[in-house]
Image (cartoon, helix red, strand yellow):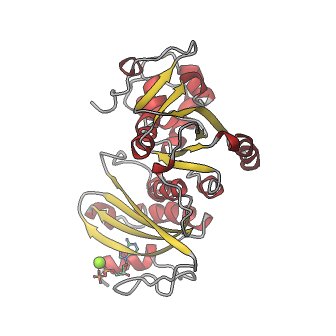
Amino acid sequence: MNKEFDIIRRYFKKTVSNAILGIGDDAALIVPSSKTELAISMDTLVSGKHFFADTDPYKLGYKSLAVNLSDMAAMGAKPRWAMLSLTLPKILAEQNEVWLGDFSQGFFELAQTYQIELIGGDTTSGPLSICVQIIGEVAKGDALRRSGALVGDDIWVSGCLGDAALALCHEKQQMVLESDEIDYCLSALHMPTARIVLGQKLIGLAHSAIDISDGLMADLGHILSASNKAATIDLVLIPCSSVMQRVIQRPFALDCLLSGGDDYELCFTASKSKHKAIEVLSEELSLPLTCIGEIIQGEGLIVKDADGNEISMEKTGYDHFRS
Ligand code: ADP
Ligand code: MG
């Protein structure tokens, strides 16, 4: 049997119940639920750029879907269908029992958690690259956008920031972490939790939202430019894990916290009148939601230290990861 079809049949073809037609024809067929809009997004992970070539394929399968789920979370959408375009080096396709088996297991384990169905894709050979398209649903007019922030809004973030970037610092030997610290940070890097439930619960609470994939500074910056607003945030309020708290004084740590990326937490803005409701939601989800600042009139992002003084962006190393 043709190798490509063999791979698709063995590792990716599953029976579908939420699609009219899944893998096997020239296109998939889906019917959106009534009174919904489709939220559609795509993310590509390229070997050597987004992950090390020897990354555990199970984790890679998991993460390639997780980063797409994070985009659905940021829109407040419920993810429903996925498509997977795989570019595989011959060597991995040949040892498919190992690599493809683990990769598809990681992918489907996360897919099953949210009842997402893989309805199609493409398989080619070449340098390893994984592209996932995700299709979700959101009630008409309800989707959370980057452009909705209003003056006076609180700025919130979920979870803790910077741990995935700490893992990268460790891998690049820019920082030495203890073995329990590195285990924790590596799991943040390889198996991020998309805030799917939070995203959907934020409909009716948040004015704007984004997922933090490129670091807080950059992604909050996207909300500000899309909303034509400015913001002040307090450095001391940014939520840190115990590992980050332990290393925060070391070189690179602040860069990780503010602009490291790969966090996949949500940053959102909401009216002050929703402050209490968001605290209640945090309890309900057992997920820290932290108010770190406020939307103001103007342009740009001001970060303040514990004394309320503005920190210069050079000092925070804001551009460090960009250079
Ligand atoms: P065509 O040549 O008509 O484009 P393909 O041979 O590319 O068809 O794909 C055959 C079927 O397998 C299609 O339904 C396609 O969506 C699906 N498919 C191909 N590669 C993948 C993959 N990596 N994951 C999931 N479905 C796939
Ligand atoms: Mg094709």
Task: Please say if 98 is above or below 226.
Answer: below
Left or right of 50 on screen, residue 150: right
Instruction: Place residue 222 in its image quadrant.
Output: top left
* Residue shown at 59% from the left, 29% from the top: 240
298 or 68, nearer to the observer:
298
101 or 119, nearer to the observer:
119
Q: Is residue 191 visible?
A: no
- Residue 157 picture location, percent across and down: 58, 39
Task: Please say if 15 is above or below 89.
Answer: below
- Residue 118 picture location, percent across and down: 48, 73
So how many labels did they put on this image? Answer: 0
Q: Quadrant of the N terminus?
A: bottom left
Instruction: Place residue 215 in its image quadrant.
Output: top left
- Residue 155 picture location, percent across and down: 57, 37
Task: Please say if 11 is above or below 199.
Answer: below
Q: Quadrant of ligand 1?
A: bottom left
- Residue 310 picture location, percent across and down: 47, 17
95 or 242, nearer to the observer:
242
